[in-house]
Amino acid sequence: MQDGVTKIIINSQVSAEGQSEDLKALAKLMNNEPVKLNKHFDYAQRRIKEINEDPETREKIMLYETRMLEREQAAGKAGYEQGKVDSAKIILENQLNNGRTLEQATEFVRNLKLISDKELEKVVAMYK
């Protein structure tokens, strides 16, 4: 994704052979195995245990994760819908560039059924 964020994906289920001690310890932590490496891992394990033992905190985390998933899904759907509108614009422009009238180009895009007639009217209005 071109969102400016660096994403690191760690598969903790495969061998960490040849990796740093920190990465090996992180894989163990992700697999709920005890880790004795440094104060950072000690702190992480302590916090995980506290969270797991507190039903209210666990519920807040689950609610947060659910909301994040809902936002991602809504953004994906909005992006998909915008992509269909953008495609309709490009097709309409191509039709116009190939000598079709605005009415002919509009009918061509309408027949593709990429977007609703209401959305198509908005696109066509930009060319009037």
Image: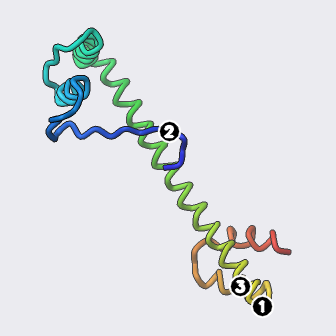
Q: Name the residue under label 1.
A: 99
Q: Mark 3 points at which residue?
A: 95
User: Residue at left 33%, top 25%?
Assistant: 59
Left/right placement of residue 3 relative to residue 30 reads: right
Q: Which of marks 2 and 3 is nearer the N terminus?
A: 2
Which amino acid type corresponds to the residue marked 1 in the rendered image? Gly
Q: Which mark is residue 34?
A: none
Q: Name the residue under label 2.
A: 5
CA distance separating discs 1 and 2: 44 Å
Q: How crowded is mark 2: few (under 14 residues within 10 Å), some or many (20 or more)?
A: few
User: Residue at left 64%, top 81%?
Assistant: 110
Q: Earlier in the sequence, mark 1 or mark 2?
A: 2
Q: Which residue is outermost to the right?
A: 128
- Image x and y of residue 81, in percent: 57, 61
Left/right placement of residue 36 relative to residue 114 reads: left
Q: Nearer the viewer, residue 94 or 109?
A: 94
Whether residue 79 is situated above or below residue 117 in the rendered picture: above
Whether residue 109 is situated above or below residue 67 in the rendered picture: below
User: Residue at left 25%, top 23%?
Assistant: 22
Which amino acid type corresponds to the residue marked 2 in the rendered image? Val
Q: Nearer the viewer, mark 1 or mark 2?
A: 2
Q: Quarter of the image for the C terminus: give it.
A: bottom right
User: Residue at left 39%, top 37%?
Assistant: 66
